[in-house]
Image (cartoon, helix red, strand yellow):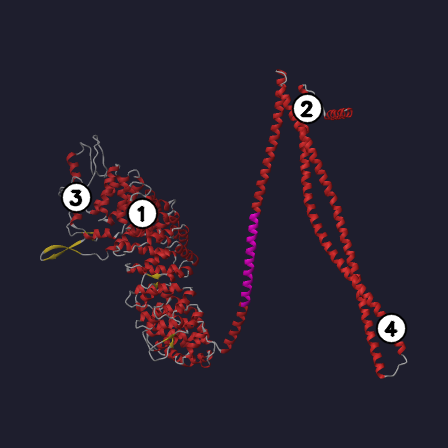
Amino acid sequence: MRRSTAAVFRGRPVNVHSVRKIAIVSSFILFSHNYQARHGEEESLCFFSEDRRFEYGSQRSSVKMNFFRGVMGGQAAGSQPSGAETIQKLCDRVASSTLLEDRRDAVRALKSLSKKYRMEVGTQAMDHLINILQTDRSDSEILGYALDTLYNIICNDEEEEQDDSEDAVTPLPVSGKHKNVSVPDENAQKQADDLGAQFTDKFIQDPEHVTLLLTLLEEFDFHVRWPGVKLLTALLKNQGVQVQGVILVSPMGVSRLMDLLADSREVIRNDGLLLLQQLTKGNAAIQKIVAFENAFERLLDIITEEGSSDGGIVVEDCLLLLLNLLKNNSSNQNFFKEGSYIQRMKPWFEVGDDNSGWSAQKVTNLHLMLQLVRVMVSPVNSPGATASCQKSMYQCGLLQQLCTILMATGVPADILTETINTVSEVIRGSQVNQDYFASVNAPSNPPRPAIVVLLMSMVNERQPFVLRCAVLYCFQCFLYKNQKGQGEIVATLLPSTIDANSISAGQLLCGGLFSADSLSNWCAAVALAHALQDNLTQKEQLLRVQLATSLGKPPVSLLQQCTNILSQGSKVQTRVGLLMLLCTWISNCPIAVTHFLHNQENVPFLTAQISENLGEDERLVQGLCALLLGICIYYNDNSLENYTKEKLKQLIEKRIGKENFVEKLGFITKHELYSRAAQKPQPVFPSPEQMLFDHEFTKLVKELEGIITKAVHKSSEEEKKEEEVKKTLEQHDNIVTQYKELIREQDAHIQELKEQVLSMTSQNEQMQVTITQQLSQIQQHKDQYNILKLKLGKDTQSQSNSQADGSQVNGLQTEELTQLKDELEELRKQHTLLKTQLGDKDALIDTLRSEPTQTTEGSARGTENTELLKELEALRGQIQSQSTEINHLKTERQELLGRAEAGSSDGVPSSNSPVDFAKIAELESRLAAQTTDMERLKEETKRSLESRADLEQQLASATSTVAILQTEKAKLQTEVQESKKEQDDLLMLLADQDQKIHSLKQKLKNLGETVEDEDDLDARDQTDDDDEEEEEDED
């Protein structure tokens, strides 16, 4: 059946070329029927029989059914089948043909038709194609055709669809003629996506199909592996989660896919990268498996081979895969850091002096590389992991390289912006990195700090908006948890540190704060607020800043100037920035609150702003004014009588109303841009007008909103109770702090003790090892000694046996007998020498035994010294009593002399005067005797003291002598013990020698020699001595 060129096949337009292809196929089918009619059954060859099978007759000729070979030259007359009918017949042939070549040709034909007739082929042929994958594993060509066909019907690639849509035309009448005009189908892509998802669902209904596909990927044949990779990638694009689940539970599923990166054919390796990108999307488990399959090493090697940032699209694919593996995956990030892969990122950012003419691919690559660095130090990561990565980046020089790009010339704007953002997160919260960044200077004349150069870009309204946001983020990260940096920035505003010849960061911030550009006002206010964040000292220091507004007028404080600009009614963005600065400034700083309230115009302005009913744009300003007034209440120290806490609350209740105040305060958190700014620290805004909130300020609002609401509703009595509770809590906190410090000290002490224990344990272990080694050495020496003894005994025995044998056979050897006699003499000499040494040792022992007697004598001397000391004490007591008696007599004498003088002065002789004179004489004689005795005793005492000193000196010398003797005694006892040991050893040696001598004598006797005993020798020596004496007497 013929169809016109304008025919529509199942809702899809079919062009002339498509129908022509169908006509060719149909013509071939018609040719087959005509061939059968002409030749009948003679050759027994039927192309399309009723059961649609190829049969081979007697000739068994092989006919290859190539549908497009030999019939392209013309078309047969008659009706042509439709595309669906052709596909149905091809599917029947795939299912029923017994010849592999016929099935291969049919699958090839389905592949050719699968792009144009995607729905028909997918609906009718998918099951047959899957069956081909299962049954025809031995033929790589038919597997490749089947995989390509499945890929064509499942893939939603836009390029493929564009190729299809180029043939989609609709005839329109123009001037009575037909003209083909392309009409784009708006729903084509959506329909293609739905079709691909449907076929994907059908394919993965049985998980074994995915497992089968993974198995086919192990084939090295290019025509199988490449279409298999593309098909699996298409499945993951359409139904990623389901396919990921199947691959995850498949044994060695991920490992098979990782092998694609090692394929030497770049096409397969590159498509393998695309496959792994789809596989690792949003699945942390697969990401971990891929990472532990050495993915980082392979990907970094590929990036290096392809030229790093100067590489092509392959480098981009590798970087995208690395981002998939590392983003929001703390395990892989830690593995990446521990594997020292951060150090391998440094060469990526080495740029030359000439940075002109960057290609688009290089910009893309470098942008992705910077994003990869940011993933490792992102603020959403755990603080510990981020700090560790920041430390590694500084140590390997990566931060220094990024700062070089930051200060280089000719770098594209988007790369410069992303570099600023990357440097920001590398230094955020890291004191070492922040200090290094503060020391970086721009290559200008004269050199300026990088911070100053960046701030110049931030307050310059001609710079791109994204660049200004990046500089603000960099400044915020530089000041984050950096009190040193905050102090340096505030110091540039103080009068004592201002340098008129140079531009400082503080001057740029003040210039931006009071410029005509609202965005500069907002950025400068937020930057200055970060210089005060959680730093009470700098908040108080900033109160000293004075500004010269105009000539002839006195300077005003920075705080007063901010409130003046606020009251002038500038743009909303400017007022929001100033209000955020003021709220940050005076929060948790009672002195700043007092300075703010000291200006009589501030409180009326705030109450007027809050109480008015303004439009939607002003609601945020009203909320911020309410927050500022609430801070003035909560942190008020009541130092100003007119603006105490109670009076401010009364003012709110009269002028505004507590409920209205709380409602206006809630306008801040209800603003649509508040939640966006609270999500992450980086200021990202689609337009400058939406740049209203700062991330850190949202934290402050969240902290203070509830506190201010309670403070406004509280009465004075409740506040007093709360203050008392606060004081109690502070006391408890102080006590707890003291205990904590004590615990810390104890922990430190315990840690020191533990370290000492560990060191002593290690020393003990070392000593044990040393002892073990020494014991083993001693045992070795003992063993060697025993072996030598045994060897000596055996040698002696063997010599005696051999001598005996020799004497029996050849007679006694004279030389051997002489040698034995010499040895016997030597042993006798050694025996005598050892006896002499033994006698010396005995004498030494007797000497040491006599030493305790000397020690006893020394102790007797000590006893004598003690007795002398007792006598000396008795003499002292006697002298003391006599001195007392002498003093008593002197007193009596003085009394008598006084009475005598009184009597003589009266001139009347007393009847008792003779008695008195006699008594006086007696007393004088007694006194003289006592004086003599006292002098004598003094002399004796002096002599006793001298003798005592001598005795003490003798005692000291005796004590030292005793100590020396005891030391010598200990040494001698040690020597005695050693001597005893040596004596025992000598005795053992003597016993051994006696044994040897006895054995040698026995040998000599056995040999027939006359051997005299020691007694005989002594008797003979004595006889010789007597003979000599007799001869001398005769002479």
Rendered location of residue 607, percent (x, y)? 39, 79
**Can you say whether 800 is above or below 934 in the image?**
above
**3 vs 4, front mark:** 4
**Image quarter hosting the C terminus:** top right
Q: In the image, is 694 to the left or to the right of 748?
A: left
Q: Which one is in front, 53 or 683?
A: 683
Of pointers 4 and 1, the one earlier in the residue sequence: 1
Q: How far apart are the alpha carbons under marks 1 and 2?
A: 92 Å
**4 vs 1, front mark:** 4
Give the crowd class for mark 3: few <14, some 14-19, many >=20 residues within 10 Å: many
Of pointers 1 and 2, the one earlier in the residue sequence: 1
Of pointers 3 and 1, the one earlier in the residue sequence: 3
Q: Amino acid at mark 4?
A: Ala
Please name the residue that numbered disc 3 is placed on: 24
Of pointers 3 and 2, the one earlier in the residue sequence: 3
| The disc label shown at residue 921, or none | 4
Q: Which one is in front, 807 or 964?
A: 964
**3 vs 2, front mark:** 2
**3 vs 1, front mark:** 1
Q: Which one is in front, 650 or 513?
A: 513
Q: Amino acid at mark 3?
A: Ile
Q: Are marks 3 and 4 in contact (CB under 8 Å)?
A: no
